[in-house]
Amino acid sequence: MEVLLHDVAYFAQSGTPALTSGTRKLSVVKILLYSGQGSTSRRKSVTSRNPSQIKDEIEKANQQAVERMMESDPVWVDLGLARKVIPGVKEKMLLHAGPPIEWDRMAGPMKGAVMGAAIYEGWARDGAEAEKLAKSGQITFVPNHHHNAAGPMAGIISPNMPVYVVHDREYGNDTYSNLNEGIGKVLRYGAYSSEVIQRLTWMRETLATTLEAVIKEIKKEKDGVAMKPIIIQALTMGDDCHNRYNAATSLFLREITPYMIQTGLDKKTVIDSFNFMAQNNFTLLNLGMASGKAMTLAAHKIKYSTIVTVLTRNGTDAGIWVSGLDNEWFTAPAPVPKGVWFPGYSEKDANPDLGDSAITETAGYGGFAMAAAPGIVSWVGGSVAYAIENTQKMYEITETKHKYFIIPFLDFQGTPTGVDLRKVVRTGITPTINTGIAHKEAGIGQVGAGIVSFPLDMFKQALKTYAQKYGI
Amino acid sequence: MPVTLQAKCIGSLALKALSTQDSTADGQVVNTFSNSFYSKTATGELVFFTNRPLRSPITVNLDATCDFEHLVKPLEPLSARGKEIRIGADTIIELGSASLYESRVEPAGKLGPEFTRIGTSLRLASFVLEIIDTHQSVLDPHALAHSGVEEFVSDGVIRLRRKGTEEQFRDAALKIVGLGSGFTPSGDDTLGGFLATYNSFAKTTERAPILLDSGLLEEKTSWISARLLDYMQRLILDEQLHHLIDSATKGDQDAVVIALQALLPRGHTSGIDIAVGAILALSLIQDIAFEKEETEVIARALGLRDLVVS
């Protein structure tokens, strides 16, 4: 006789905890019961059930996720103090890069940046007071990603720091990032000397004033500054848009300079602001990151999707989010980059990797587009061949090739886009990014730049959790 | 000019095999890849050289970034003298600073109730295998070895639940040796994963370990694959499989899933095939130890669905 049963019934019959959660559609199996030849025992033959429906659901969800990631349209629309523009940011709260972490486990550069932010905010007069305050538990530490923000390296955003507001015209999300200070002795690398605090104060009082006036002028004519066209163009001009923003910064300045002149601000303010941005090739990094955050946020929280929507690290732990697993963190110890060192420094000085900047790779540019940026190897190490090889390798773990971000050198192929958790675990290849390197001690700053791969363990943990959520 | 490579670690069996070479009968390289190469010693043992970190009793882990395909050629002679291995005229491997890796599989004397927890791990791991790319592995219905492994499960694995069916199992097992595509055929990998796991728990389930005749294995598959399968059945295991056995022994649900996932990147499909064998064996052990009948369910969850079960 022939009977049709649902999987759930079959599993239940077999004494296995039933598939009762309803998290996946149940398929039908066909069970044939007959007498075994020359035997009194009953033989069961199970013919193949429908091809895996869950796999189809995942494919559909992943396609939707990467489609949204690619169609996201981030536009710089505003600039203001974090406490005024980022929902949920309060007094004595510091946003930071990476997965959640408390003071005791923070690495040197993260601690240094926290101390510098406390001095900048006027919560402490010096490093010793700042450290005491941080230890006391009076400061709340929250990951940037919990507030749709992203910050490079330590990524500290304090309530009175000016931040860019980026609006996704396609999906309506707002994302945020702070302003870039330049390289060397800077807060994001854990430096907190008086020159660092003075620069941050100048940025709030002068640079932010200029940029606020600029965006107001721009908005008289249009929505803001569309970021995707700048990234698209910069990728064809030798940037990877993570560690090389030379072209993107120039393109941005070309776009905003006429409006700077129109602001009516005094000449010195305008010139100082222009020069500060023009002399820093990383000026556009932070806006590039807020844009990446908008793109990946559009792909987040899609049921069944195995696309990674956050790749980040805080100097102690690396962490990821997966689209179909909401805001659950999967972490592993942060790796130490292999790099090119500033004079006088070496690998022994390096802190494990930190920063939210891998949001660029998560969105399909940055290290994943290294083949577009051969010049970057002089900054992060490796060879041109390695840069190309890295991009090629990332195709093995991503869902698609980007529609808009293209690499001329690879015959105008799209960049590898949408890291698929399943492919990472299957191949053992993890996302490889380029990054700045901070000194392991608080207060020193940047000591190099290099290349780093994310640890595999957190992807395995995430896939196990995915199986728990959707599998049984 | 000779190239000198440093060994970071040497497996205990590799050390023994290389030390027992005599000066009149050197071994030779039998196969090379960019990251690794295989050699056959004068005593007929396989020694695996790699620049990857995974350790095993038969492995020499090298501190090297070079492409071995350009450095070492198949059929080149290999000789070991003191703390040095010479390959052909141009390659020297120094063992002086290498650490020793020894593998000891020590399952618990008796399986405690915590072992039943791994049932959930096996279902989770089966789900992971269902959603990843298993193209050309035993789980691919279009792969050469797929139906053969389904028969192996029906005629060998499930019957093995009953004592006294070892001979039937051997017959079913030998049918999949050499079956499938790949450097190590899928059938060999699946069987290797199964026997490594089953034999690790043989004592605790009061069963005799199942050892297939190594000569027969060499008749049915390539020399390298036969040797690897033989090592696995004799519990000469790499640290990933070792970790899997340890985790299962402890009934550590999470660690078992992670350990099974850790196997997946291995080779083209070897990791998947070994994991399938290990999952089937763990399920069978659970059935034997706790009088359950879940192996069919797990096999079907894995995608081995055309089972004929008596």
Image (tube, helix red, strand yellow):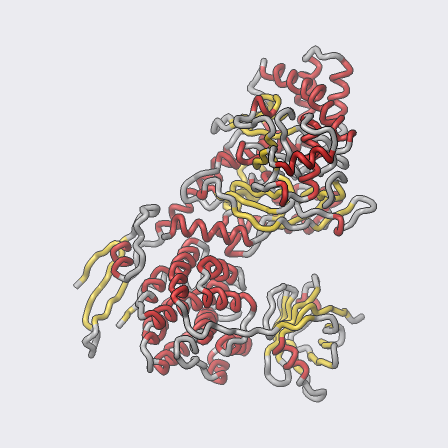
Q: Is residue B56 visible?
A: yes
Percent across and percent down for residue A14 are: 28, 62
Percent across and percent down for residue A108 are: 70, 43
Percent across and percent down for residue A263 are: 68, 13
Percent across and percent down for residue B115 are: 41, 65
Q: Is residue A268 above or below residue B284?
A: above
Quick one: quadrant of the N terminus of chain A? Answer: bottom left
Q: Is residue A241 visible?
A: no
Between A261 and B203, the one lying in front of the other is B203
Between A33 and B143, the one lying in front of the other is A33
For the point 20% across and 79% down, which residue is it?
A: A38
Q: How many marks?
A: 0
Left or right relative to A54: residue A369: right
Between A16 and A429, the one lying in front of the other is A16
For the point 61% across and 78% down, which residue is it?
A: B13
Q: Is residue B164 above or below residue A310?
A: below
Q: Is residue B73 above or below residue A418?
A: below
Which residue sits furthest left? A1
Which residue sits furthest bottom? B24
Image quadrant assignment for residue A9: bottom left
For the point 50% across and 52% down, which residue is it?
A: A461
For the point 64% across and 43% down, which residue is it?
A: A106
Left or right relative to A53: residue A282: right
Which residue sits furthest right? A344
Image quadrant assignment for residue A12: bottom left
